[in-house]
Image: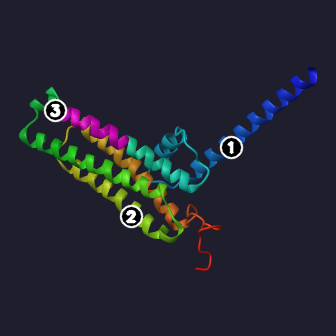
Amino acid sequence: MQAQLTLLLTTLLLSLLFTFSCAAQAQDLVRSSCVHARYPRLCLRTLSNYAGPANSTLDVARAALRVSLAHARRASKYLRASKGGASSSSLSKRQRAALSDCVEQVSDSVEELRKSLEELQHLRPETFRWQMSNAMTWVSAALTDGDTCLDGNVRPDVKRRVTDLARVTSNALYMINRLGQGGTGKPKPRSGPGSNSNN
């Protein structure tokens, strides 16, 4: 009985050590990925709290996009509620128009970030560069949408939310650029049945 308990405790301890080691490696990857981002502290804070895998630069880029998409969805929901809420009646005609434009711009950002994430989730070696270009274009467009929104006469609460979205999106764009330049997330060509290894 004593031997079984010792074996169980040893197995549990080794499992915990392995888990902590993997978590430390993931944190190191996130830290080294965020160090040169435009907003490094925000990058580190948002990606350190991300629950998904972070074993490669592709994982980090996907995580950064998921964070950006989540922020975009929250901002979009907030803006739609603000547009239809009682407080919108106290806005000037110009402010209502700016808020309406922001609702549309942030909604476009949600779609662009969604398409970019979809692209990164289905990378193929033969179309890697083209897919990376698509992802960068859509994230850049999402940033432009945020800038366009902020160019209007927006309320401070709208400005704060859209600025936050722009910052996490800027970090996501950096991660995608980093992935595209290094090619470290590029999928390996398939081998085996059905693949054409003579190309």
Label 1, on which residue? 22
Residue 123 is situated, as x and y percent measured from the top left of the image, at 50, 61
- Quadrant into which the C terminus falls: bottom right
Residue at the image position 50 percent from the left and 65 percent from the top: 180
Image disc number at residue 134? 2
Question: Considering only order in the chain, which callout, 3 or 2, is on the residue closer to the N terminus?
Answer: 3
Residue 81 is situated, as x and y percent measured from the top left of the image, at 22, 32
> Which span of residues is magenta-colored?
71-83
The kind of secondary structure the magenta stretch mainly shows is helix
Task: Look at the image and tell me whether residue 34 can be seen.
Answer: no
Label 3, on which residue? 84
Q: Label 1 amino acid?
A: Cys
Q: Label 3 amino acid?
A: Gly
Image disc number at residue 102? none
Where 36 falls versus 164 (above or below)?
A: below
- Quadrant into which the N terminus falls: top right
